[in-house]
Image (spheres, rainbow, N blue to C red):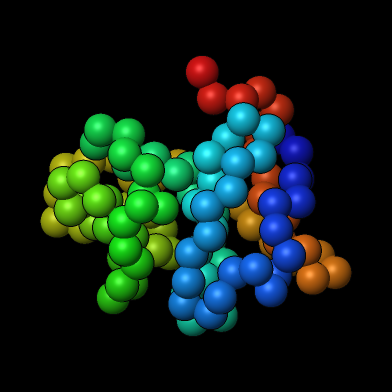
Amino acid sequence: MKWQRVADRGELPPEGKLAVEICGWQVLLVSNADCLFAYHDRCTHQAAQLSCGRVRRGAIMCPLHGARFKIDTGECIGGAYPPLRRFEVRVTDGAIEVELPDAPPG
């Protein structure tokens, strides 16, 4: 696992989202109540890009079938899908960094 700089803090609006690709990983950054979260930008149901969906009421919504995942944990709300793959995130000197696996997804 290695920390990777993915964006400047100013690029992610409050209560917003930002999709980035870094080291072969599609990463979805989400800002909620002054907290940052980072997830693999893929729904665990049919691999749709979550960044194409909406973020509202504390949930990330899949644009394909409407599955909802808690912003703070990645757990599926009211469904039987596995939780989202979550990455550790931090802000260092105004830069958002995400801890990603050394190898890209297979």
Percent across and percent down for residue 52 are 36, 52
Q: Quadrant of the N terminus?
A: top right
Q: Is residue 23 left or right of residue 29?
A: right
- Write the residue at 59% across / 69% down: 12
> How many numbered discs, if any?
0
Residue at the location (35% across, 67% down)?
Answer: 55
Residue farthest toward the top in the current orientation of the protein: 106
Would you say 77 lies left or right of 71 here?
Answer: left
Q: What residue do we see at 18% from left, 53% from top?
A: 66
Compared to 66, does 16 lie above or below?
Answer: below
Image position of 80 with respect to 59: above or below = above
Q: Pinpoint residue 29: horizontal percent, then vertical percent.
A: 54, 58
Q: Residue 83's x, y, as percent? A: 34, 45
Q: Nearer the viewer, residue 77 or 59?
A: 59
Residue drawn at the location 54% of the way across and 46% of the way down: 27
Residue 50 visible, this angle: yes
Q: Is residue 45 above or below residue 34?
A: above
Task: Say if residue 87 shows up in the picture.
Answer: no
* Residue 105, quarter of the rendered image: top right
* Image position, residue 56 (x, y; %): 31, 72
Quarter location, residue 80? top left
Q: Quadrant of residue 54?
A: bottom left
Q: Nearer the viewer, residue 10 or 88?
A: 10
